[in-house]
Amino acid sequence: MSHDATLQVADLDAGLIYRLFSGAIAPRPIAWVSTLSSEGHANLAPFSFFNVASVAPPILAFSPLLNGEGGTKDTVANLREVGECIVHIGGEVLAEALNTTSASLPRDGDEFEHAGLTKASLGDLRVPRISEAPIAFGCRLHDILTFGDQPLSGNLVLAEVTVIHADPKVWDGRHVGREALAPIGRMAGSDYIRCTDLFALERPK
Ligand SMILES: Cc1cc2nc3c(=O)[nH]c(=O)nc-3n(C[C@H](O)[C@H](O)[C@H](O)COP(=O)(O)O)c2cc1C
């Protein structure tokens, strides 16, 4: 079966664009984000629409979409209430736990407990850190850009990093050890990927 190579976005539904994005823009890093509601309920969720927005100042960007009913995910609701998050990077050993925290629990459900993870503190942030995660970027909310109110509309969270936890097992004070971290990425559907087949190219002068 052949498909026309030129697609007009106006003719495509959001589900198809989602599949094109998640298949073509891959592998993606995964932000494993903890937040807290104003009532004190902790929340955890992974987001692979994620990257660095700025280094100086240090700002991370990730995008929780509105869900299939056009509803706001807990992470965004909590960020609007408390204005803090912690973006963790979990390696392969934490993949199962990370995946478990993508469950849609009720607003007062705690994904730390659901996934058997331990809470720790980070600096003066109120949001709990995942003790098992080797890297944690503690952030204050900079801004949330919204793009509409339909299902799958993005909420681009810009979060300014104010404090960092870097486990010496993966961070020697200068570099992150790739083998020690064993980073994982997100592909389309239910697929994840390991970073075990690297090649290097020198940048041109
Ligand atoms: C590896 C992985 C990556 C994900 N990335 C995203 C994403 O970038 N944006 C999004 O809206 N949902 C993403 N999801 C789904 C959310 O994690 C899921 O909707 C979660 O329940 C949201 O949690 P919350 O309502 O507690 O914020 C991802 C799920 C997994 C397993």
Image: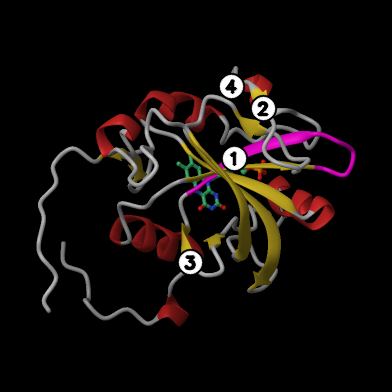
Of the numbered discs 1 and 4, the one sitting upstream in the chain is: 1
Q: Which mark is residue 24?
A: none
Residue on which the image places disc 2:
120
Label 1 – label 2 distance at C-alpha: 17 Å
Residue on which the image places disc 3:
55
Which residue lies at the image location 78% right of the left edge and 37% below the top edge? 107
Does the beta carbon at disc 1 come under 8 Å from ligand 1?
A: yes
Residue 3's place in the image compared with 45, above or below, is: below
Q: Over which residues does the magenta segment extend? A: 37-47
Q: Which circle, 1 or 2, is nearer the viewer?
A: 2
Residue found at the very far top of the displayed protein: 116
Badge 3 amino acid? Val
Q: Is residue 158 magenta?
A: no
Image position of 75 (left or right of 168): right
Of the numbered discs 1 and 2, the one sitting upstream in the chain is: 1
Percent x, y of residue 1: 16, 61
Label 1 – label 3 distance at C-alpha: 24 Å
Residue on which the image places disc 1:
45
Which residue lies at the image location 90% right of the left edge and 38% below the top edge? 39
Are circles 1 and 4 on residues that touch, CB within 8 Å? Answer: no
Q: Which circle, 2 or 4, is nearer the viewer?
A: 2
Decide: few, some or many residues near mark 1? Use Cα within 10 Å; few <14, some 14-19, many ≥20.
many
